[in-house]
Image (spheres, helix red, strand yellow):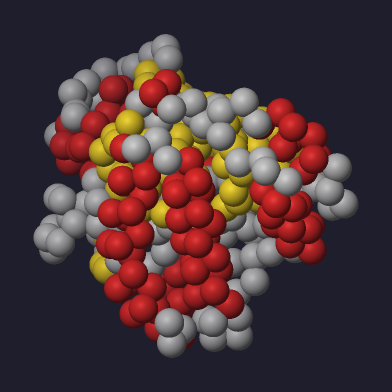
Amino acid sequence: MIADSTPICARAHANIALIKYWGKRDAALNLPAVGSISITLADLYTETALTWHNAATDTATLDGQPVESKRISHVMDLIRALADTDQRAAVTSTNNFPTGAGLASSASGFAALVVSASAAAGLELSTRELSILARQGSGSAARSIEGGFVEMHRGHRADGTDAYAAPLADKDSWPLEVVVAITTRAQKAVDSTTGMTDTATRSDFFDAWVAGADGDLDAAREAIANRDFDALGALSERSCLKMHGLMLSTGDGLIYWSSATVAAIHEVRKLRAEGVPVYFTIDAGPQVKALCAPGYGAMVAERLGAVVGVEAAQLMGLGPAAHVIA
Ligand code: DP6
């Protein structure tokens, strides 16, 4: 048993995938069907404070509201097993951005949870071990353990020990800028887990998606190594459109975009036609993230902010790895 504890607080930043993760090779261990490449974002993060308590269950709040989550308990069970304790935890989290609207709240949330919980349990885990734990909360969370440019390996082993995220390049070595165009603050209708599970069984294109992933990852890794913005941007836009094509081809059709999403896509392409180095990407929600070469973010934010239906356009740089803050 761990003695009465003072809170341990961790901060983890959201990330956006440039080469997308969509689909699972194993649901129980949450193993991805494809690898992915992401960038961690400076200005969107979750802070999680964790204390051990003498209650029968784990409790959790997010932005002051109680949350019931089997995934939180599952991740806590994994950490308890490593720490050889059965003590339950009180988890208090805050997001500095809207939850569940396609801004990677589960990514930063589970990354912050495993960093705070493992520290509170006195465990000294490697970032690989932390990302494997975070993956079991949410696949994209494995990537939020690291900062800058990050690759999530799909792995091949059945036990998932080779499905983890690792850094590709430091955030300061290529200071790309990102504009997050918020088109709605409402929760999305179909969560990613449900959507991707549906896709695997109800889209004719799923096998082609998986078959194309390694080539996209190789090309994106090379573009990052060469600091080739146009190559990386084009690959990112294409991976996003392939993923949304897959979503559209699923069952009745999964449509995450709003009319403002489409308007923002056209504005990014218009900017590019004017010579501005900018590409878009979109996750399982209506928000558009514009990837900009260094120095172009402010003007892209101004233009996207003026698109009808865009509520706010927030400019940010790349963010650090998840870390304990107190
Ligand atoms: C569209 O990580 O939310 O954002 O592993 O089921 O929790 P689970 O899914 P999640 O999926 C993220 C999907 C995506 C693309 C990406 O981030 O790579």
> Which quadrant, please, contains the N terminus?
top left
The residue drawn where x is 33% and y is 17% is: 4
Left or right of 248, for residue 313? right
**Residue 116 left/right relative to 290:** left
Percent coordinates x, y for residue 241 in the rendering: 55, 65
Q: Is residue 36 visible?
A: yes
Number of marks:
0
Point out the image quarter for the C terminus.
Answer: top left
| Residue nearer the viewer, 83 or 235 | 235
Residue found 39% across the figure and 23% down from its top: 173
Residue 136 percent location from the top left of the image: 31, 51
In the rendered view, tell whether residue 22 sits above or below residue 182. Answer: below
Q: Position of residue 12 (x, y in %)?
A: 44, 30
Residue at the image position 26 percent from the left and 18 percent from the top:
3
Where is residue 106 drawn, in percent x and y? 48, 46
User: Can residue 34 be seen by looking at this rendering?
Assistant: no
Instruction: Look at the picture and state if 165 lies above or below 155.
Output: above
Q: Which sits in the foreground, 124 or 167?
A: 167
The residue positioned 38% from the left and 73% from the top of the image is: 209
Residue 27, located in which quarter of the rendered image? bottom left
Viewer-proximal residue among 7 and 237: 237
